[in-house]
């Protein structure tokens, strides 16, 4: 996407184009006479705001027209941040160890929260539930089979 203030790109809408032309003229005038400095600053602020609005509209149009909104959102975040697609990144190691390393920040956060709440008085005002709840044993293959039938495009 390039730098944030990339003024060399050709604007899409006429208001933005006209503002860019005024900005270029004032820039040239400012270089020859400092009197045009304030006018240049004002038009530059206007142009920057128009660029922001145009960028927002561009992303808004992309999200509205997207079938897979979650995928689009993450690709846009990466585009804006300037990060590369890391889908080809390989993670190696023991799956249980990797899962534990992934879980550690979440688990430590929960224990920190729990330790900060130990001094709180707990008032139970929830009535006892007399209904029983039973679970059926499910195999990993059943979960994989069921999850492969889900469509990702509606996850948002």
Image (cartoon, rainbow, N blue to C red):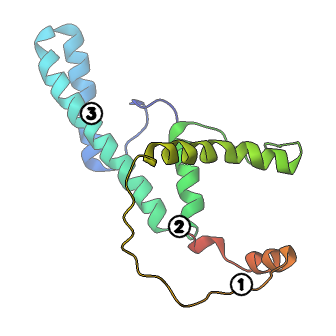
Query: Residue 89 vs residue 118: left or right?
Result: right
Q: Return the residue nearer the eye: 67 or 9.
A: 67
Query: Residue 133 vs residue 10: left or right?
Result: right
Task: Choose mark 3 or mark 2, whichever is in front.
Answer: 2
Q: Residues within 10 Å of mark 3 (few under 14, many from 20)?
A: few
Q: Return the residue nearer the eye: 65 or 128.
A: 128
Task: Choose mark 1 or mark 2, whichever is in front.
Answer: 1
Q: Return the residue nearer the eye: 64 or 103.
A: 103
Tell which circle, 1 or 2, labels the residue nearer the N-terminal end: 2
Given the current orientation, which residue lies at the most extreme bottom position? 131
Q: Is residue 144 above or below residue 77?
A: below
Residue under label 3: 21
Tell me the CA gap for discs 1 and 2: 38 Å
Tags 1 and 2 touching, CB below 8 Å: no
Q: Quadrant of residue 140?
A: bottom right
Residue under label 2: 66
At a point 50% along the width and 85% down the height, the residue shown is 129
Query: Residue 145 vs residue 48: left or right?
Result: right
Q: Position of residue 137 (x, y in %)?
A: 80, 82
Q: Position of residue 33 (x, y in %)?
A: 15, 9
Tell which circle, 3 or 2, labels the residue nearer the N-terminal end: 3
Q: Secondary structure at mark 2?
A: loop
Task: Choose mark 3 or mark 1, whichever is in front.
Answer: 1
Q: Residues within 10 Å of mark 2 (few under 14, many from 20)?
A: some
Q: Quadrant of residue 7?
A: top left
Residue under label 1: 135
Q: Position of residue 18 (x, y in %)?
A: 24, 40
Tell me the CA gap for discs 3 and 1: 69 Å
Q: Secondary structure at mark 3?
A: helix
At a point 50% along the width and 41% down the height, the residue shown is 80
At a point 58% along the width and 67% down the height, the residue shown is 68
């Amino acid at each position: 996407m390039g730098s944030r203030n990339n003024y060399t790109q050709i604007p899409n809408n006429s208001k933005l184009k006209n503002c860019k032309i005024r900005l270029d003229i004032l820039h040239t005038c400012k270089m020859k006479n400092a009197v045009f400095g304030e006018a240049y600053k004002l038009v530059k602020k206007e142009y920057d705001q128009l660029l922001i609005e145009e960028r927002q509209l561009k992303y808004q149009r992309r999200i509205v027209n997207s079938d897979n909104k979650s995928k689009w959102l993450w690709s846009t975040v990466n585009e804006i941040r300037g990060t590369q697609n890391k889908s080809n990144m390989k993670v190696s190691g023991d799956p249980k160890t990797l899962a534990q390393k992934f879980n550690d920040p979440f688990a430590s956060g929960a224990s920190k929260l729990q330790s900060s709440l130990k001094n709180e008085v707990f008032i139970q005002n929830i009535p006892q539930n007399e209904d029983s709840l039973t679970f059926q044993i499910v195999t990993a293959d059943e979960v994989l089979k069921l999850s492969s039938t889900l469509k990702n495009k509606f996850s948002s």
